[in-house]
Image (spheres, rainbow, N blue to C red):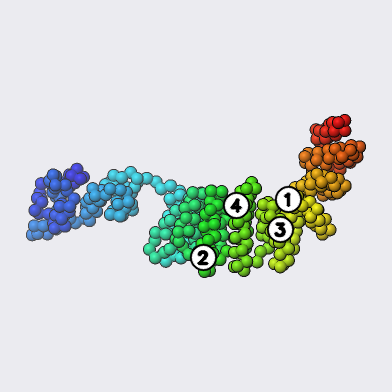
Amino acid sequence: MAMSMARYASPALSQSQWPPTLSLLSVSVFPSHLTPLSLPEQQNPNPNSKTYIPSNSSFLRSLFSSSTRYFCNSQEDCKTLNPTALQNPNNSFNSNPNLNRTRTPLEKQFETWIDKLKPGFIPNDVEDALRSQSDPDLALDIFRWTAQQRGYKHNHITYLAMIQIAATGKRFGHVETLIEEVVAGACSGSLPLYNSIIRYCCGRRPLFNRAFDVYKKMVKSPDCKPSLETYTMLLNAILRKFNKLNVSYVYLHAVRSLLKQMKISGVIPDTYALNLIIKAYSKCLDMDGAIRVFREMGLYGCEPNGYSYSYIAKGLCEKGRVNQGLGFYKEMREKSLIPTSSTYMILICSLSMDRRFEEAIETAFDMLSNSMVPDLLTYKTLLEGLCREGKGDEAFEILEELRKKDGSMGEKTYRNLLDGLHFLSHE
Protein backbone atom coordinates (compact mmCIF):
# COMPACT_ATOMS: atom_id res chain seq x y z
CA MET A 1 0.00 0.00 0.00
CA ALA A 2 2.84 2.34 0.84
CA MET A 3 4.42 1.64 -2.55
CA SER A 4 1.17 2.44 -4.40
CA MET A 5 1.11 5.82 -2.59
CA ALA A 6 4.78 6.53 -3.14
CA ARG A 7 4.26 7.93 -6.61
CA TYR A 8 2.15 10.69 -5.07
CA ALA A 9 4.57 11.38 -2.20
CA SER A 10 5.80 14.94 -1.69
CA PRO A 11 7.71 16.61 1.12
CA ALA A 12 5.59 19.76 0.69
CA LEU A 13 2.76 18.52 2.90
CA SER A 14 2.88 16.89 6.28
CA GLN A 15 0.25 14.59 7.70
CA SER A 16 -1.10 17.43 9.84
CA GLN A 17 -1.87 19.42 6.67
CA TRP A 18 -3.98 16.67 5.11
CA PRO A 19 -7.70 17.33 4.66
CA PRO A 20 -9.99 15.67 7.20
CA THR A 21 -11.21 12.99 4.72
CA LEU A 22 -7.71 11.84 3.88
CA SER A 23 -6.64 11.98 7.52
CA LEU A 24 -9.45 9.53 8.30
CA LEU A 25 -8.32 7.28 5.44
CA SER A 26 -4.79 7.35 6.73
CA VAL A 27 -5.95 5.92 10.03
CA SER A 28 -7.92 3.07 8.47
CA VAL A 29 -5.84 2.30 5.40
CA PHE A 30 -2.23 2.39 6.59
CA PRO A 31 -0.86 -0.33 8.84
CA SER A 32 0.39 0.85 12.20
CA HIS A 33 4.06 0.18 11.42
CA LEU A 34 4.06 2.30 8.24
CA THR A 35 4.31 6.10 8.04
CA PRO A 36 1.73 7.66 5.70
CA LEU A 37 3.24 9.52 2.80
CA SER A 38 2.26 13.07 1.83
CA LEU A 39 0.13 14.03 -1.15
CA PRO A 40 1.57 15.11 -4.52
CA GLU A 41 2.42 18.78 -4.85
CA GLN A 42 -0.11 20.62 -6.98
CA GLN A 43 -1.15 24.22 -7.35
CA ASN A 44 -3.51 25.36 -4.68
CA PRO A 45 -6.40 27.32 -6.19
CA ASN A 46 -6.71 29.30 -3.02
CA PRO A 47 -3.28 30.59 -1.93
CA ASN A 48 -4.69 31.87 1.37
CA SER A 49 -5.94 28.46 2.33
CA LYS A 50 -3.58 26.25 4.31
CA THR A 51 -5.58 23.08 3.52
CA TYR A 52 -4.90 21.33 0.21
CA ILE A 53 -7.92 19.89 -1.65
CA PRO A 54 -7.19 17.90 -4.83
CA SER A 55 -8.71 19.43 -7.92
CA ASN A 56 -9.13 16.08 -9.71
CA SER A 57 -11.38 13.33 -8.31
CA SER A 58 -9.42 10.61 -10.13
CA PHE A 59 -6.90 10.57 -7.33
CA LEU A 60 -9.59 9.81 -4.75
CA ARG A 61 -10.92 6.97 -6.93
CA SER A 62 -7.39 5.59 -7.19
CA LEU A 63 -6.95 5.86 -3.44
CA PHE A 64 -10.26 4.09 -2.85
CA SER A 65 -9.34 1.36 -5.31
CA SER A 66 -6.06 0.77 -3.53
CA SER A 67 -7.68 0.73 -0.11
CA THR A 68 -10.30 -1.78 -1.17
CA ARG A 69 -7.61 -4.13 -2.38
CA TYR A 70 -6.00 -3.89 1.04
CA PHE A 71 -9.20 -4.92 2.84
CA CYS A 72 -10.71 -7.39 0.32
CA ASN A 73 -10.23 -11.07 1.02
CA SER A 74 -11.96 -12.30 -2.16
CA GLN A 75 -13.03 -11.19 -5.57
CA GLU A 76 -16.62 -10.90 -4.43
CA ASP A 77 -15.62 -8.44 -1.67
CA CYS A 78 -13.83 -6.29 -4.23
CA LYS A 79 -16.90 -6.28 -6.44
CA THR A 80 -18.92 -4.94 -3.55
CA LEU A 81 -16.48 -2.33 -2.30
CA ASN A 82 -15.06 -1.26 -5.67
CA PRO A 83 -17.61 -1.53 -8.49
CA THR A 84 -15.58 0.87 -10.64
CA ALA A 85 -12.88 -1.75 -10.96
CA LEU A 86 -15.27 -3.91 -13.00
CA GLN A 87 -16.44 -0.99 -15.09
CA ASN A 88 -12.87 0.00 -15.96
CA PRO A 89 -10.89 -3.23 -16.64
CA ASN A 90 -7.89 -1.19 -17.81
CA ASN A 91 -7.43 0.47 -14.41
CA SER A 92 -3.74 0.32 -13.63
CA PHE A 93 -4.45 -0.13 -9.91
CA ASN A 94 -6.42 -3.38 -10.49
CA SER A 95 -3.95 -6.08 -9.51
CA ASN A 96 -6.49 -8.98 -9.54
CA PRO A 97 -6.13 -10.86 -12.85
CA ASN A 98 -9.56 -12.53 -12.46
CA LEU A 99 -11.25 -9.17 -12.80
CA ASN A 100 -9.45 -8.48 -16.08
CA ARG A 101 -10.09 -11.82 -17.75
CA THR A 102 -12.37 -12.20 -20.76
CA ARG A 103 -15.83 -13.50 -19.92
CA THR A 104 -16.77 -16.87 -21.36
CA PRO A 105 -19.69 -17.20 -23.81
CA LEU A 106 -21.69 -18.98 -21.11
CA GLU A 107 -21.19 -16.03 -18.72
CA LYS A 108 -22.19 -13.56 -21.41
CA GLN A 109 -25.28 -15.61 -22.23
CA PHE A 110 -26.15 -15.80 -18.54
CA GLU A 111 -25.86 -12.02 -18.14
CA THR A 112 -27.96 -11.52 -21.28
CA TRP A 113 -30.80 -13.53 -19.82
CA ILE A 114 -30.48 -11.87 -16.45
CA ASP A 115 -30.84 -8.50 -18.18
CA LYS A 116 -34.02 -9.73 -19.90
CA LEU A 117 -35.63 -10.52 -16.54
CA LYS A 118 -37.02 -7.14 -15.67
CA PRO A 119 -37.40 -6.08 -12.02
CA GLY A 120 -40.50 -7.59 -10.46
CA PHE A 121 -40.36 -10.76 -12.59
CA ILE A 122 -42.75 -13.57 -11.71
CA PRO A 123 -42.42 -17.38 -11.92
CA ASN A 124 -43.94 -17.44 -15.42
CA ASP A 125 -41.16 -15.13 -16.62
CA VAL A 126 -38.55 -17.39 -15.07
CA GLU A 127 -40.16 -20.46 -16.66
CA ASP A 128 -39.92 -18.82 -20.09
CA ALA A 129 -36.26 -18.00 -19.47
CA LEU A 130 -35.52 -21.56 -18.32
CA ARG A 131 -37.25 -23.30 -21.24
CA SER A 132 -35.49 -20.99 -23.70
CA GLN A 133 -32.12 -22.45 -22.72
CA SER A 134 -30.48 -25.20 -24.69
CA ASP A 135 -27.84 -25.62 -21.98
CA PRO A 136 -29.24 -27.26 -18.80
CA ASP A 137 -26.35 -25.89 -16.73
CA LEU A 138 -27.16 -22.33 -17.79
CA ALA A 139 -30.81 -22.94 -16.95
CA LEU A 140 -29.81 -24.14 -13.49
CA ASP A 141 -27.67 -21.02 -12.96
CA ILE A 142 -30.63 -18.82 -13.83
CA PHE A 143 -32.87 -20.92 -11.57
CA ARG A 144 -30.51 -20.48 -8.60
CA TRP A 145 -29.84 -16.81 -9.27
CA THR A 146 -33.52 -15.88 -9.40
CA ALA A 147 -34.15 -17.75 -6.14
CA GLN A 148 -31.80 -15.33 -4.37
CA GLN A 149 -33.54 -12.18 -5.53
CA ARG A 150 -35.51 -10.21 -2.99
CA GLY A 151 -39.26 -10.57 -3.17
CA TYR A 152 -39.19 -13.65 -5.41
CA LYS A 153 -39.81 -17.32 -4.63
CA HIS A 154 -39.99 -20.32 -6.95
CA ASN A 155 -43.28 -22.16 -7.26
CA HIS A 156 -44.42 -25.47 -8.75
CA ILE A 157 -44.22 -24.08 -12.29
CA THR A 158 -40.52 -23.23 -12.16
CA TYR A 159 -39.61 -26.39 -10.25
CA LEU A 160 -41.42 -28.52 -12.82
CA ALA A 161 -39.64 -26.75 -15.69
CA MET A 162 -36.23 -27.09 -14.03
CA ILE A 163 -36.71 -30.79 -13.20
CA GLN A 164 -37.76 -31.57 -16.77
CA ILE A 165 -34.84 -29.60 -18.22
CA ALA A 166 -32.31 -31.26 -15.91
CA ALA A 167 -33.70 -34.74 -16.59
CA THR A 168 -33.63 -34.20 -20.35
CA GLY A 169 -30.07 -32.92 -20.07
CA LYS A 170 -29.09 -35.99 -18.00
CA ARG A 171 -28.15 -33.89 -14.98
CA PHE A 172 -29.47 -36.60 -12.69
CA GLY A 173 -27.72 -35.36 -9.57
CA HIS A 174 -29.37 -31.96 -9.93
CA VAL A 175 -32.74 -33.63 -10.52
CA GLU A 176 -32.49 -35.55 -7.27
CA THR A 177 -31.51 -32.39 -5.42
CA LEU A 178 -34.54 -30.55 -6.82
CA ILE A 179 -36.81 -33.46 -5.88
CA GLU A 180 -35.53 -33.39 -2.32
CA GLU A 181 -36.26 -29.66 -2.17
CA VAL A 182 -39.84 -30.22 -3.35
CA VAL A 183 -40.42 -33.05 -0.86
CA ALA A 184 -39.03 -30.81 1.90
CA GLY A 185 -41.62 -28.15 1.02
CA ALA A 186 -39.58 -25.65 -0.99
CA CYS A 187 -42.66 -24.83 -3.09
CA SER A 188 -46.37 -25.45 -3.26
CA GLY A 189 -47.28 -28.72 -4.96
CA SER A 190 -49.25 -29.41 -8.11
CA LEU A 191 -50.46 -32.56 -9.83
CA PRO A 192 -48.16 -32.16 -12.89
CA LEU A 193 -45.14 -31.56 -10.63
CA TYR A 194 -45.78 -34.55 -8.39
CA ASN A 195 -46.55 -36.85 -11.32
CA SER A 196 -43.38 -35.73 -13.06
CA ILE A 197 -41.34 -36.56 -9.94
CA ILE A 198 -43.03 -39.97 -9.56
CA ARG A 199 -42.40 -40.75 -13.23
CA TYR A 200 -38.72 -39.95 -12.82
CA CYS A 201 -38.38 -41.93 -9.58
CA CYS A 202 -40.19 -44.95 -11.00
CA GLY A 203 -37.74 -45.01 -13.89
CA ARG A 204 -34.72 -45.19 -11.57
CA ARG A 205 -34.50 -48.18 -9.26
CA PRO A 206 -32.70 -46.44 -6.34
CA LEU A 207 -35.52 -43.88 -6.14
CA PHE A 208 -38.35 -46.43 -5.95
CA ASN A 209 -39.15 -45.61 -2.30
CA ARG A 210 -38.97 -41.86 -2.98
CA ALA A 211 -41.83 -42.26 -5.49
CA PHE A 212 -44.06 -43.58 -2.72
CA ASP A 213 -42.97 -40.76 -0.42
CA VAL A 214 -44.29 -38.31 -3.00
CA TYR A 215 -47.46 -40.40 -3.36
CA LYS A 216 -48.09 -40.21 0.40
CA LYS A 217 -47.55 -36.46 0.24
CA MET A 218 -50.19 -36.28 -2.49
CA VAL A 219 -52.69 -38.33 -0.46
CA LYS A 220 -52.35 -35.89 2.45
CA SER A 221 -52.55 -32.84 0.19
CA PRO A 222 -55.97 -31.16 0.03
CA ASP A 223 -55.71 -30.10 -3.62
CA CYS A 224 -53.16 -32.46 -5.23
CA LYS A 225 -54.76 -35.88 -4.87
CA PRO A 226 -53.29 -38.79 -6.89
CA SER A 227 -54.76 -39.19 -10.36
CA LEU A 228 -55.20 -42.24 -12.56
CA GLU A 229 -51.82 -41.49 -14.11
CA THR A 230 -50.25 -41.55 -10.63
CA TYR A 231 -51.68 -44.97 -9.80
CA THR A 232 -50.73 -46.37 -13.20
CA MET A 233 -47.09 -45.31 -12.84
CA LEU A 234 -46.85 -46.79 -9.34
CA LEU A 235 -48.46 -50.07 -10.41
CA ASN A 236 -46.02 -50.35 -13.29
CA ALA A 237 -43.10 -49.74 -10.95
CA ILE A 238 -44.32 -52.40 -8.51
CA LEU A 239 -44.80 -55.00 -11.23
CA ARG A 240 -41.18 -54.62 -12.26
CA LYS A 241 -40.35 -55.97 -8.81
CA PHE A 242 -42.28 -59.19 -9.49
CA ASN A 243 -39.23 -61.16 -10.60
CA LYS A 244 -39.50 -63.96 -8.04
CA LEU A 245 -42.59 -65.57 -6.58
CA ASN A 246 -41.65 -65.08 -2.92
CA VAL A 247 -40.84 -61.41 -3.59
CA SER A 248 -44.08 -60.97 -5.53
CA TYR A 249 -46.16 -61.79 -2.46
CA VAL A 250 -44.53 -58.91 -0.60
CA TYR A 251 -45.36 -56.37 -3.28
CA LEU A 252 -48.86 -57.75 -3.85
CA HIS A 253 -49.85 -56.05 -0.60
CA ALA A 254 -48.85 -52.70 -2.09
CA VAL A 255 -50.99 -53.43 -5.16
CA ARG A 256 -53.99 -54.17 -2.96
CA SER A 257 -53.43 -50.94 -1.02
CA LEU A 258 -53.28 -48.88 -4.21
CA LEU A 259 -56.48 -50.49 -5.51
CA LYS A 260 -58.22 -49.79 -2.22
CA GLN A 261 -57.04 -46.17 -2.13
CA MET A 262 -58.10 -45.72 -5.74
CA LYS A 263 -61.64 -46.77 -4.87
CA ILE A 264 -61.73 -44.58 -1.74
CA SER A 265 -60.59 -41.49 -3.60
CA GLY A 266 -63.08 -42.04 -6.41
CA VAL A 267 -60.51 -42.52 -9.17
CA ILE A 268 -62.05 -44.59 -11.95
CA PRO A 269 -59.49 -47.04 -13.40
CA ASP A 270 -59.20 -47.77 -17.10
CA THR A 271 -58.53 -51.09 -18.83
CA TYR A 272 -54.77 -50.62 -18.69
CA ALA A 273 -54.70 -50.02 -14.91
CA LEU A 274 -57.02 -52.96 -14.24
CA ASN A 275 -54.87 -55.21 -16.44
CA LEU A 276 -51.85 -54.30 -14.31
CA ILE A 277 -53.75 -55.34 -11.19
CA ILE A 278 -54.90 -58.59 -12.83
CA LYS A 279 -51.30 -59.28 -13.88
CA ALA A 280 -50.07 -58.73 -10.32
CA TYR A 281 -52.60 -61.20 -8.91
CA SER A 282 -51.82 -63.73 -11.64
CA LYS A 283 -48.07 -63.56 -11.05
CA CYS A 284 -48.72 -64.40 -7.42
CA LEU A 285 -51.12 -67.17 -8.54
CA ASP A 286 -53.92 -65.51 -6.59
CA MET A 287 -56.36 -66.38 -9.34
CA ASP A 288 -59.50 -65.76 -7.33
CA GLY A 289 -58.39 -62.15 -6.80
CA ALA A 290 -57.47 -61.83 -10.48
CA ILE A 291 -60.84 -63.17 -11.65
CA ARG A 292 -62.65 -60.87 -9.20
CA VAL A 293 -60.95 -57.81 -10.71
CA PHE A 294 -61.64 -59.22 -14.18
CA ARG A 295 -65.38 -59.45 -13.43
CA GLU A 296 -65.40 -55.89 -12.01
CA MET A 297 -64.12 -54.37 -15.25
CA GLY A 298 -67.66 -53.88 -16.52
CA LEU A 299 -68.54 -51.84 -13.42
CA TYR A 300 -65.96 -49.23 -14.45
CA GLY A 301 -67.12 -49.19 -18.05
CA CYS A 302 -64.03 -51.12 -19.19
CA GLU A 303 -64.01 -53.94 -21.73
CA PRO A 304 -61.51 -56.79 -21.23
CA ASN A 305 -58.94 -57.04 -24.02
CA GLY A 306 -56.46 -59.69 -25.11
CA TYR A 307 -54.11 -58.95 -22.25
CA SER A 308 -56.92 -59.29 -19.69
CA TYR A 309 -57.77 -62.78 -20.91
CA SER A 310 -54.14 -63.77 -21.40
CA TYR A 311 -53.15 -62.97 -17.81
CA ILE A 312 -56.10 -64.97 -16.50
CA ALA A 313 -55.62 -67.99 -18.79
CA LYS A 314 -51.87 -68.15 -18.18
CA GLY A 315 -52.23 -67.83 -14.41
CA LEU A 316 -54.90 -70.52 -14.25
CA CYS A 317 -52.73 -72.96 -16.22
CA GLU A 318 -49.73 -72.25 -13.95
CA LYS A 319 -51.98 -72.77 -10.96
CA GLY A 320 -53.01 -76.17 -12.35
CA ARG A 321 -56.57 -75.16 -13.24
CA VAL A 322 -56.04 -76.04 -16.90
CA ASN A 323 -59.67 -76.63 -17.80
CA GLN A 324 -60.69 -73.21 -16.48
CA GLY A 325 -57.76 -71.59 -18.29
CA LEU A 326 -58.82 -73.27 -21.55
CA GLY A 327 -62.29 -71.84 -21.03
CA PHE A 328 -60.93 -68.28 -20.88
CA TYR A 329 -58.84 -69.01 -23.98
CA LYS A 330 -61.86 -70.18 -25.96
CA GLU A 331 -63.92 -67.21 -24.75
CA MET A 332 -61.34 -64.74 -25.99
CA ARG A 333 -60.99 -66.49 -29.34
CA GLU A 334 -64.76 -66.26 -29.77
CA LYS A 335 -64.34 -62.49 -29.39
CA SER A 336 -61.52 -62.54 -31.97
CA LEU A 337 -59.00 -61.59 -29.32
CA ILE A 338 -55.48 -62.98 -29.74
CA PRO A 339 -53.54 -64.31 -26.73
CA THR A 340 -49.91 -63.46 -26.09
CA SER A 341 -47.24 -65.93 -27.22
CA SER A 342 -46.40 -66.87 -23.62
CA THR A 343 -50.07 -67.68 -22.99
CA TYR A 344 -50.18 -69.90 -26.06
CA MET A 345 -47.08 -71.83 -24.98
CA ILE A 346 -48.20 -72.28 -21.38
CA LEU A 347 -51.55 -73.54 -22.57
CA ILE A 348 -50.00 -76.01 -25.08
CA CYS A 349 -47.63 -77.41 -22.46
CA SER A 350 -50.37 -77.66 -19.82
CA LEU A 351 -52.73 -79.49 -22.18
CA SER A 352 -49.94 -81.83 -23.32
CA MET A 353 -49.02 -82.70 -19.73
CA ASP A 354 -52.71 -83.40 -19.07
CA ARG A 355 -52.66 -85.71 -22.16
CA ARG A 356 -55.19 -83.54 -23.96
CA PHE A 357 -53.22 -83.72 -27.18
CA GLU A 358 -55.99 -82.86 -29.62
CA GLU A 359 -56.65 -79.55 -27.89
CA ALA A 360 -52.89 -78.95 -27.56
CA ILE A 361 -52.32 -79.56 -31.31
CA GLU A 362 -55.26 -77.34 -32.21
CA THR A 363 -53.86 -74.57 -30.00
CA ALA A 364 -50.39 -74.94 -31.56
CA PHE A 365 -51.73 -74.51 -35.10
CA ASP A 366 -53.86 -71.57 -33.95
CA MET A 367 -50.70 -69.97 -32.60
CA LEU A 368 -48.89 -70.44 -35.92
CA SER A 369 -51.85 -69.00 -37.82
CA ASN A 370 -51.45 -65.80 -35.77
CA SER A 371 -47.78 -65.42 -36.82
CA MET A 372 -46.42 -66.61 -33.48
CA VAL A 373 -43.94 -69.46 -33.12
CA PRO A 374 -43.65 -71.91 -30.19
CA ASP A 375 -40.22 -72.37 -28.68
CA LEU A 376 -38.24 -75.61 -28.63
CA LEU A 377 -39.49 -76.62 -25.19
CA THR A 378 -43.12 -76.28 -26.25
CA TYR A 379 -42.54 -78.41 -29.37
CA LYS A 380 -40.73 -81.10 -27.37
CA THR A 381 -43.44 -81.19 -24.68
CA LEU A 382 -46.15 -81.76 -27.28
CA LEU A 383 -44.35 -84.18 -29.63
CA GLU A 384 -42.52 -86.24 -27.03
CA GLY A 385 -45.75 -86.46 -25.03
CA LEU A 386 -47.39 -88.08 -28.07
CA CYS A 387 -44.53 -90.59 -28.33
CA ARG A 388 -44.77 -91.55 -24.68
CA GLU A 389 -48.48 -92.27 -25.21
CA GLY A 390 -47.63 -94.66 -28.02
CA LYS A 391 -48.57 -92.23 -30.78
CA GLY A 392 -45.14 -92.03 -32.38
CA ASP A 393 -46.39 -92.11 -35.97
CA GLU A 394 -48.81 -89.25 -35.26
CA ALA A 395 -45.98 -87.33 -33.65
CA PHE A 396 -43.84 -87.61 -36.83
CA GLU A 397 -46.77 -86.43 -38.94
CA ILE A 398 -47.47 -83.49 -36.64
CA LEU A 399 -43.78 -82.53 -36.79
CA GLU A 400 -43.85 -82.39 -40.59
CA GLU A 401 -47.04 -80.31 -40.57
CA LEU A 402 -45.60 -77.96 -37.99
CA ARG A 403 -42.45 -77.57 -40.11
CA LYS A 404 -44.56 -76.56 -43.10
CA LYS A 405 -46.53 -74.04 -41.05
CA ASP A 406 -43.52 -72.72 -39.17
CA GLY A 407 -41.34 -71.12 -41.81
CA SER A 408 -38.85 -69.98 -39.19
CA MET A 409 -38.09 -73.50 -37.90
CA GLY A 410 -34.41 -73.97 -38.58
CA GLU A 411 -32.70 -77.17 -39.58
CA LYS A 412 -31.06 -77.45 -36.16
CA THR A 413 -34.43 -77.27 -34.36
CA TYR A 414 -35.97 -79.78 -36.75
CA ARG A 415 -33.09 -82.27 -36.30
CA ASN A 416 -33.27 -81.87 -32.55
CA LEU A 417 -36.98 -82.68 -32.49
CA LEU A 418 -36.58 -85.52 -34.97
CA ASP A 419 -33.78 -87.16 -32.99
CA GLY A 420 -35.85 -86.94 -29.83
CA LEU A 421 -38.80 -88.69 -31.50
CA HIS A 422 -36.57 -91.45 -32.94
CA PHE A 423 -35.07 -92.05 -29.51
CA LEU A 424 -38.45 -92.33 -27.79
CA SER A 425 -39.98 -94.49 -30.54
CA HIS A 426 -37.20 -97.13 -30.16
CA GLU A 427 -37.50 -97.42 -26.37
In percent of width and height, residue 131 lies at: 52, 57
On the question of residue 34 being in view, the answer is yes
Seen at 76% across and 56% down, the residue is 309
Q: Give the amino acid at mark 1.
A: Lys
Q: Secondary structure at mark 2?
A: helix
- Measure the C-alpha gap from mark 1 to mark 4: 19 Å
- Measure the C-alpha gap from mark 3 to mark 4: 18 Å
Q: Give the amino acid at mark 3.
A: Asp
Q: Which residue is mark 1?
A: 319
Indicate which disc, 2 or 4, sits on the residue closer to the N terminus: 2
Indicate which disc, 1 or 3, sits on the residue closer to the N terminus: 3
Q: Give the amino acid at mark 2.
A: Lys
Q: Which residue is mark 2?
A: 220
Q: Along the horizontal axis of the image, is 237 left or right of 427?
A: left
Q: Which residue is mark 3?
A: 288
Q: Along the horizontal axis of the image, is 297 left or right of 182?
A: right
Seen at 80% across and 44% down, the residue is 353
Seen at 85% across and 33% down, the residue is 424
- Measure the C-alpha gap from mark 2 to mark 1: 39 Å
Seen at 50% across and 52% down, the residue is 175
Indicate which disc, 2 or 1, sits on the residue closer to the N terminus: 2
- Of 201 and 174, which appears nearest the observer? 201
In percent of width and height, residue 421 lies at: 85, 34
Q: Give the amino acid at mark 4.
A: Val
Residues packed near mark 1 inside 10 Å, few (<14), some (14 to 19) or many (20 plus) = some
Q: Secondary structure at mark 4?
A: helix
Q: Along the horizontal axis of the image, is 89 left or right of 242?
A: left
Q: Which residue is mark 4?
A: 250
Q: Answer yes or no: do the residues labelled 2 and 1 have beta carbons within 8 Å?
A: no
